[in-house]
Image (cartoon, grey):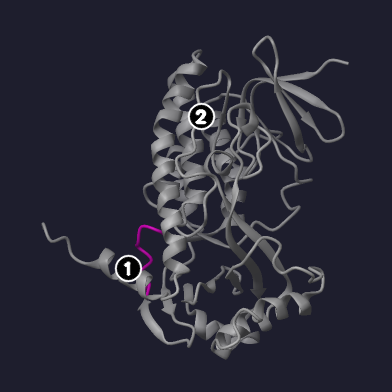
């Protein structure tokens, strides 16, 4: 049986892989994207994203989708509140005109925008990569669950933290950062959860202290998406049935015994199950030697903690810059990959370092003091002006 072959294959239909596919297909370059999900609606895509002017928005400009993106922005969502564990407000910012450099959009809507911009059939759904290998002729083989396989001249790993493509270029694996997120939703918040809606406010909430906290934001459908951050050993909460929602809620709330009731309610009153996610990261400055015909982008290249909001933005910029490099070097893939990696490595290193520092800042024993100080410093007028 013959094996299918693709000149360019991307593993992973996340924001980074889709941005790359959009840049290439818009220029008439064919690309095949493979994703493990059964279809685009197989699972929810998470909450809101703040799209940075110098990264995510720059990528959307390169993809020719910035105007369409602007129509997805949730007005007023750049508002922010920083509280301590007693629900005392330390900093509050309003967003009355939504003209800032980090507008908020729904991740699922942004992904749909990218998917809808691609030619039909670009994404091959239900194609889970389980192994990769470099062949003697320089091509790369990808084996899929179920036994099917294909080869590619250029293989791009956009397949997340546990990438199946990464072993072709690097032996690095993500390490546990010691932090676990418990994700929850409170639906129709203004009507069904008015107390939670009030404490979160119109945009983003940080309620921090004692090495833990609640991060929450208002979504475009009127719900609240909550990330409860706990510094915990691997395996936490040991012995709890993760399918037993009341038991999971109790295990999370045990970490916040003396926190204000309005903050505990973000977990206690959540609708549906809580989802626990360990936060992992690759080493800051992760890079690899140039390997012919293969590269990585997004979390596959530089997964980091979410405490600087750089993950999705960096992945999209990776995809755009890789696409532009390939278009700038037609017929010379190695020159394109070298150009892309030389620019991506230092940029990703800086973002990963910022993310690691943000985690320390947000989960410090005296939080939210450091975070408030950082925002105050960022807002000071330029002394040189």
Answer whether labels 1 and 2 touch (C-beta < 8 Å): no
In the image, 289 versus 320, the foreground residue is 289
74 vs 346: above or below? below
Q: Left of 284 or right of it: where is 7? A: right
Q: Left of 282 or right of it: where is 369? A: left
Q: Residue furthest left?
A: 384
Residue assigned mark 1? 375
Magenta includes 346? no
The C terminus sits in image quarter: bottom left
6 vs 105: above or below? above
Q: Residue at x 76, y 52 (%)?
A: 42
* Label 2: how many Cα within 10 Å (few below 14, some 14–19, many 20+): some
Q: Residue furthest front?
A: 233
Taken as a whole, is the magenta stretch helix, strand or loop? loop
Magenta includes 98? yes
Between label 1 and label 2, give the one nearer the viewer: 2
23 vs 313: above or below? above
In the image, 356 versus 22, the foreground residue is 356
In percent of width and height, residue 291 lies at 55, 21
Q: Residue at x 40, y 84 (%)?
A: 89
The N terminus sits in image quarter: top right
Q: Residue at x 35, y 62 (%)?
A: 100
Label 2 residue SS: loop
Residue assigned mark 2? 288
**Range of magenta residues:** 94-102
Q: Residue at x 41, y 46 (%)?
A: 55
* Label 1: how many Cα within 10 Å (few below 14, some 14–19, many 20+): few
Earlier along the polypeptide chain: callout 1 or callout 2?
2
Label 1 residue SS: helix
């Amino acid at each position: 049986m013959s094996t299918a072959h693709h000149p360019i294959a991307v593993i992973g239909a996340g924001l980074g892989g889709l941005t790359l596919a959009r840049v290439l297909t818009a220029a008439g370059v064919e690309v095949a994207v493979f994703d493990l999900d059964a279809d685009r609606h197989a699972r929810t895509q998470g909450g809101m994203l703040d799209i940075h002017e110098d990264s995510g928005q720059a990528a959307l400009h390169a993809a020719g989708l910035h105007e369409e993106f602007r129509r997805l922005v949730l007005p007023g969502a750049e508002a922010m509140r920083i509280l301590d564990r007693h629900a005392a407000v330390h900093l509050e910012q309003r967003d009355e005109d939504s003209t800032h450099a980090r507008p908020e959009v729904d991740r699922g809507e942004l992904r749909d925008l990218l998917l809808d911009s691609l030619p039909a059939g670009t994404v091959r759904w239900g194609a889970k990569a389980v192994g990769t290998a470099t062949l003697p002729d320089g091509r790369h083989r990808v084996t899929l669950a179920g036994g099917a396989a294909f080869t590619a001249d250029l293989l791009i790993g956009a397949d997340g933290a546990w990438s199946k493509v990464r072993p072709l270029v690097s032996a690095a694996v993500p390490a546990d950062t010691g932090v676990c997120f418990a994700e929850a939703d409170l639906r129709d918040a203004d009507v069904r959860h008015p107390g939670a809606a009030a404490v979160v406010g119109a945009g983003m909430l940080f309620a921090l202290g004692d090495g833990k906290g609640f991060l929450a934001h208002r979504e475009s459908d009127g719900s609240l998406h909550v990330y409860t951050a706990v510094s915990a050993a691997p395996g936490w909460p040991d012995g709890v049935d993760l399918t037993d929602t009341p038991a999971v809620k109790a295990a999370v709330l045990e970490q916040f015994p003396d926190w204000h009731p309005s903050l505990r309610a973000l977990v206690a009153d959540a609708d549906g199950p809580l989802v626990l996610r360990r936060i992992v990261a690759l080493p800051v400055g992760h890079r690899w030697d140039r390997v012919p015909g293969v590269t990585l982008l997004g979390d596959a290249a530089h997964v980091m903690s979410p405490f600087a909001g750089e993950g999705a933005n960096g992945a999209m910029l990776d995809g755009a810059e890789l696409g532009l490099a390939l278009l700038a070097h037609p017929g010379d893939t190695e020159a394109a990959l070298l150009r892309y990696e030389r620019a991506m490595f230092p940029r990703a290193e800086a973002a990963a370092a910022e993310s690691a520092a943000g985690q320390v800042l947000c989960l410090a024993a005296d939080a939210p003091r450091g975070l408030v100080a950082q925002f105050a410093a960022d807002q000071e007028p330029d002394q040189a002006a």
